[in-house]
Amino acid sequence: MSAATTTAGSMTVIGKGRPRVEGPLKVTGTAQYTADHSFPGMLYAVPVGATIASGTIASIDTARARQMPGVRAIFKRGDLGKIVRITPDFMAMYYVDEPRPALDDDVVRYYGQYVALAVADTFEQAKAAADAVAVSYKADTPNVDPRLEAKQTTVASERGDADTAFAGAPVTIDVHYGITTETHNPIETHATVAVPDGDTLTLYETSQGVVNHRNVVADMLGLPRDRVRVISKFLGSGFGNKLFPWSQSPLAAAAAIALKQPVKLVLSRPMMFHSVGHRPRTEQRMRIGAKRDGKLVSLRHDYVNATSILDDYVENCGEATPHMYSVPNLRVTSGLAKRNIGTPTSMRGPGAVPGLFALESAMDELAIELGMDPVQLRLHNEPNLDEGLGLPFSSRHLKECLSLGAAKFGWSKRDAKVAAMKRDGVTIGWGVAACSWLAARFDCTATIELRDNGSARVASAVQDIGTGTYTAMAQMAAEILGIEVEKVEVALGDTDLTPGPLSGGSMLTASLVAPISRAIASAGEKLIAAACAGKGSPFSGKNPGDLRFSGGRVAVKDDSRSAATFDAILRALKTASVSGDGAADGTFPPKEKPRFSSHSFGAHFVEVTWQPEIARLRVSRIVSAIDAGRILNPLAARNQIEGALVMGIGMALFEGTEYDPRNGAPMNASLADYVVPVNADVPALEVHFVEFPDLNLNALGARGVGEIGLAGTAAAITNAVYHATGVRVRELPLRIEDLL
Ligand code: MOS
């Protein structure tokens, strides 16, 4: 089903499945993750977290902790050098979700908020000292109520008159959905190793954005940015909670500066539930009005998300709603409910993922109301343009995803009646949902070095959060240079390199395409100039304008027999290397009115099995068809979608953080109690890419694949559950008792 393209066939590296280039480093334990870094004289820091969620600190007694073996310092408010609050600017990509520095005042606004920091010679000593700090509080009753009500709402998108059209619609749906707080649980917890050296500071960090991290933390510490270096070479994943710095990083850095020694601070698993973000609880009301033939006439999407006391984090649930379907009358509103819970943050597919659970569930409910096939209902409402923005889509192939997915899944054999389909004595249910995730590019720069041994080094201060950025950068450079991937060294995750953007929004791969190709072109120009000017080169004395650089070779234009590889020319010139740099402006945040609406799309088809006798529900099959432009590395891309589908099973069936109403503590703050899917929960996953290159986004037509796979998945599962059981699940995660 691949789209015919002129260039795809001629590429030798791009589009081929390629194992991670850094894989051997990881499986042999050679890769140094943040917490693996140790330095002579390094101390260990353990924060003390508040055991209330609302109130004030009455006293902090550190006397006993200070006397304990190996203890170097117990810091509380006022004991540490200044950490200042910065003003985050999302549009300038200068960002932090929780700008309040640690230990800033004596008010406690969420459970686990840092109130002190113990530093000692060993981790065990620091932990014992942290536990020995005696804090007394004046506690208030915290508000962690899961029922959300917004004081005021904001219109996020509007067209036509949704209310009048809804009132006059012959078929209507008016339903509420809720999704419990989800906590990011990357295997690698957040860590900072702060190394002061004279007036410079190096931070080894678990960061999805080293440049932003450097800028924010340097400013919070009042240090010149050029004296702070942030390094993040390998990450044990992130899901979004490592996009922006959290308060433990400047805290560790300030302690290291105060003590003039390296300090390592690694969060425990419970701390991951307190102070480094989560996907907040959302409540959504969907109202859809349709004609009897299924044509939508009105769509209203009103959502509220929980946020922290100090920060207005908006979980943008209406992100996809305005462009998913053709509907003349639409209104999306957004509201916030303040809770005594830490500040939320982006979690894989922020906004669109919870939003599409509601929209794609409601579309299924509408299909049932209409007695219409849910695939047909979606095809029937396919828009010709983004009706929210009034812009053409850069490339939208949702129809192809629905058709291909349906064919691969065998959807035509579906009996629409509830519990009508059986196999091997169990009831099976089939559900479908569509998905969408934005496609865009950040500003990005890259450098290349071409060497006389035929190798190259490509670099940018970006990160590989485990998704395959090392491999993608190597592939891009190898493709353009006509060399093997193994000959490309990739440098990333270090603010000493040329600036690169966040590993976020599934935008990094698309952002790197132009800068890498421009860097190589600029190195080629320099090589041509040197080859013409230098002695001993096959092109000595030639006019640079008569030469071209392509496929890693310099040649006289229109005379391919004259071609010489870059390394042969460098050797002839007795030059070790030639370098080039490239930059490209991004489309996000937008600098001007966009010409296109750019999104990825897809469709998930899910089968569940249901055994009512023993209340056993299983997801037994998922087939996903994804439109993410050209796929650079099918192996890594399929792995991204599969991982997202597993996370979708977690979202639908397992994941949820529960807060104790008495003290605001997350009650299931461990990997034993916060349930995520394991192998036994995950069936065969089948992923197909429709591969229509999105050439409006970049020259390769590649979009990101990190998040699209999670959008819509939970709805496809609960839609299948309805088909099997007749029970409509509107609150995630599903509880087995709901089905009884
Ligand atoms: Mo993603 S939630 O932008 O890391």
Image: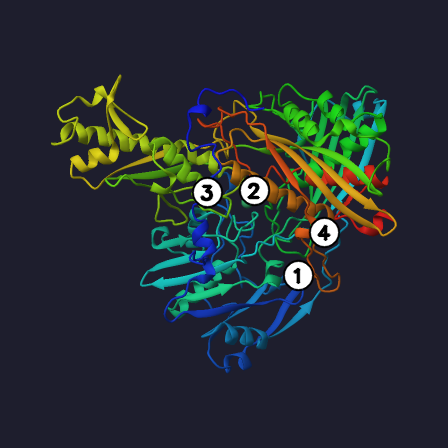
Badge 4 is on which residue?
A: 654
Which of label 2 and label 1 is nearer to you? Answer: 2
Q: CA distance from mark 2 to mark 1?
A: 28 Å
Amino acid type indicated by mark 1: Ala
Q: Is residue 267 left or right of residue 356?
A: left
Please report contact status of discs 2 and 1: CB closer than 8 Å, yes or no.
Answer: no
Q: Residue at x 75, y 61 (%)?
A: 661
Which of label 2 and label 4 is nearer to you? Answer: 2
Which badge, 1 or 4, is on the more N-terminal residue? Answer: 4
Residue 469 - label: 3
Which badge, 2 or 4, is on the more N-terminal residue? Answer: 2
Q: Is residue 23 left or right of residue 144?
A: left
Image coordinates of residue 23 in percent, x first then y, are: 46, 49
Up the image or down, 561 lies above or below 608; here it is above
Amino acid type indicated by mark 2: Asn
Which badge, 2 or 1, is on the more N-terminal residue? Answer: 2
Residue 639 - label: 2
Residue at the extreme front: 424
Total tally of numbered discs in the picture: 4
Q: CA distance from mark 3 to mark 2?
A: 13 Å
Please report contact status of discs 3 and 2: CB closer than 8 Å, yes or no.
Answer: no
Which of label 3 and label 2 is nearer to you? Answer: 2
Q: CA distance from mark 1 to mark 4?
A: 14 Å
CB of residue at label 3: within 8 Å of ligand 1?
no
